Image (cartoon, rainbow, N blue to C red):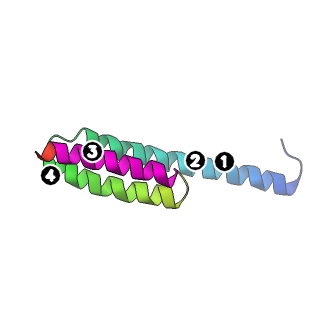
């Protein structure tokens, strides 16, 4: 356990940030699964829109790398197009 006041604060902040990031990452993964498991084109399109918003926000906040977000968006868009046919 840290003894110095600033180290204690850093530990508290790290714990809070970890919880927040874990929740955001979980929500992102759930959104991606909703797109992949969609059965109709309309359902997939709506799920894709919300997933893109979450991916962009996660990339902007450095939760995931921007190229990872782009890759996910590209693959999800391909899956939605395939479902629309």
| Helix, strand or loop at mark 2 | helix
What label does residue 35 carry, if any? 3
Q: Which residue is mark 4?
A: 42
Which residue is rendered at x = 16% and y = 40% of the image?
39
72 left or right of 44 in image: right
Q: Which residue is mark 1?
A: 15
Q: Residue 71: within the magenta?
A: yes
Circles 1 and 2 in contact, beta carbons < 8 Å: yes
Q: Which residues are magenta?
A: 64-82
| Helix, strand or loop at mark 1 | helix
- Looking at this view, is 38 or 84 the one in front? 84
63 left or right of 2 in image: left
Q: Which residue is mark 2?
A: 19
What is the C-alpha distance between the residues marked 4 and 2? 33 Å
Q: Position of residue 64 (x, y in %)?
A: 51, 50
| Helix, strand or loop at mark 4 | helix
- Looking at this view, is 84 or 30 the one in front? 84
Q: Which one is in front in this view, the residue at disc 1 or the one at disc 3?
A: 3
What is the C-alpha distance between the residues marked 4 and 3? 11 Å
């Amino acid at each position: 356990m840290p003894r110095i006041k600033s180290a204690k604060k850093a530990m508290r902040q790290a714990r809070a940030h970890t919880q927040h990031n874990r929740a955001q990452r979980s929500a992102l993964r759930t959104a991606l699964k909703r797109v992949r498991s969609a059965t109709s084109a309309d359902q997939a399109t709506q799920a894709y829109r919300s997933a893109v918003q979450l991916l962009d926000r996660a990339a902007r906040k450095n939760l995931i790398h921007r190229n990872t977000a782009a890759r996910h968006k590209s693959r999800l868009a391909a899956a939605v197009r395939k479902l629309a046919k």
